[in-house]
């Protein structure tokens, strides 16, 4: 009987097919991380004393949660004190005696506008994005100047960063490397004696930096997000839907021929004996529509349930997910006083997106 349920499930896969022709393979927490370094120069945003420029160097550790959104931690050291305004009024200028003049540690969010508006493509080389975040900045070698008798301020300040990124993916088909050009502004948000948070160009630096990132290898075997071509699967689903619409009796008859019927079996497989519950990718929770369908099964009925999963992910995960789908349907029906004779997860069945649970009413 379980084989009959699985065969019927393949026919019913068209009930929950997706419209998209491509999709992203599920990623894990350790996927899509990158590590990089950058160097550049900055100058006061007021442009009242542009040269000599202030050199800087930084490292960056980040993760892309999706092809559009991500985050990173950035550490940046500054080596110049040309009109680097540490406090306002403007005559309070950094007068550092150390090699490293400033240090900034920031947490930034990232947006890839190219992927947002043009869609993600593994073969895409150029990306345009933005970064913005908050951080902590400190100044070295100038304690007597900044922390003077009038208590104008201190060496530690809240900072912010706003920047654009122009990025190119390199390294052949794998594209593990990125180079980027990043113009941006580093803001000192608490530059006054009372540390009031404010954006003031007199306490900001305009920077231009060039850097590179190395994208670590992911669980999908690449250094990027992996797209899946669903065209063939959708075509097969549409073909099955057409067959079911034209000749439902012949389709069911053909399916049941492949399974020998025990002599003691007197049940007849009909479409009205079967209920199909669809699930979202990677999910095992029942939707309101699924519960409404299951509510049609009469109290006291005896049922058999088979859960399945789509091909994405590992076998272990799919086996566990398919069993969870069978169990959640079984628990819901038991709550409605329906007799569940069996609830079995069968993992992946076929090559198409059969994220369903099939309920057979005896």
Image: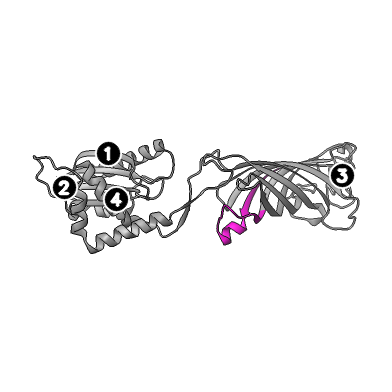
- Please tell me whether residue 103 is drawn above or below residue 356 in the rendered image: above
Of callouts 2 and 4, the N-terminal one:
4
Which stretch appears magenta?
106-130
- Please tell me whether residue 148 is drawn above or below residue 289 in the rendered image: above
- Which residue is rendered at x = 89% and y = 48% of the image? 82
Distance, label 2 to label 3, CA atoms, is: 79 Å
Horizontal and vertical percent for residue 232?
A: 41, 55
Q: Which residue carries the number 2 mark?
A: 299
Distance, label 3 to label 4, CA atoms, is: 68 Å
Q: Name the mark nearer the viewer: 4 or 1.
A: 4
Of callouts 1 and 2, the N-terminal one:
2
Q: Which residue carries the number 3 mark?
A: 80
Residue 329 shows up from this direction: yes
Q: Name the mark nearer the viewer: 2 or 4.
A: 4
Categorize mark 3 by other alpha carbons within 10 Å: few (<14), some (14-19), many (20+). Answer: many
Residue 156 shows up from this direction: no
Q: How is the image coloured?
A: one colour
Dot 3: what SS?
loop
Left or right, 50 with respect to 107, comes to right
Q: Which residue carries the number 1 mark?
A: 344
Q: 137 or 41: nearer the eye? A: 41
Q: Name the mark nearer the viewer: 3 or 1.
A: 1
Distance, label 3 to label 1, CA atoms, is: 68 Å
Q: Which residue carries the number 4 mark?
A: 10
């Amino acid at each position: 009987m379980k084989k009959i349920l699985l065969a019927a499930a393949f026919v019913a896969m068209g009930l929950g097919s997706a419209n998209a022709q491509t999709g992203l393979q599920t990623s894990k927490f350790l996927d899509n991380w990158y590590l990089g370094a950058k160097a550049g120069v900055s100058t006061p945003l007021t442009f009242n004393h542009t040269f000599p420029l202030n050199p800087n160097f930084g490292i960056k550790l980040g993760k892309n949660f999706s092809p559009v959104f991500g985050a990173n931690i950035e550490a940046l050291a500054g080596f110049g004190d040309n009109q680097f305004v540490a406090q306002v009024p403007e005559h309070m200028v950094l007068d550092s005696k150390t090699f490293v003049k400033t240090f900034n540690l920031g947490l930034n969010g990232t947006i890839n506008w190219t992927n947002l508006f043009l869609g993600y493509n593994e073969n895409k080389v150029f990306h345009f994005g933005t970064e913005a975040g908050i951080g902590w900045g400190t100044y070295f070698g100038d304690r007597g100047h900044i922390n003077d008798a009038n208590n104008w301020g201190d060496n530690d300040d809240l900072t912010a960063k706003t920047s654009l990124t122009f990025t190119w993916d390199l390294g052949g088909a794998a594209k593990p490397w990125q180079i980027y050009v990043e113009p941006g502004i580093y803001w000192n948000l608490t530059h006054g004696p009372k540390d009031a948070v404010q954006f003031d160009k007199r306490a900001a630096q305009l920077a231009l930096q060039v850097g590179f990132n190395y994208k670590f290898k992911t669980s999908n075997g690449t250094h990027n997000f992996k797209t899946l071509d669903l065209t063939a699967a959708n075509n097969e689903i549409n073909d099955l839907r057409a067959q079911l619409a034209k000749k439902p009796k012949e389709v069911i008859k053909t399916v049941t021929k492949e399974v020998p019927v025990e002599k003691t079996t007197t049940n007849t497989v009909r479409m009205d004996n079967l209920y199909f519950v669809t699930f979202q990718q990677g999910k095992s929770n029942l939707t309101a529509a699924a519960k409404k369908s299951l509510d049609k099964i009469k109290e006291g009925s005896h049922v058999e349930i088979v859960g399945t999963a789509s091909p994405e992910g590992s076998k272990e995960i799919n086996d566990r997910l398919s069993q969870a789908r069978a169990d959640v349907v079984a628990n819901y029906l038991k709550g409605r006083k329906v007799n569940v004779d069996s609830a079995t997860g069968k993992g992946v069945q076929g090559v198409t997106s059969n994220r369903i649970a099939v309920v057979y009413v005896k």
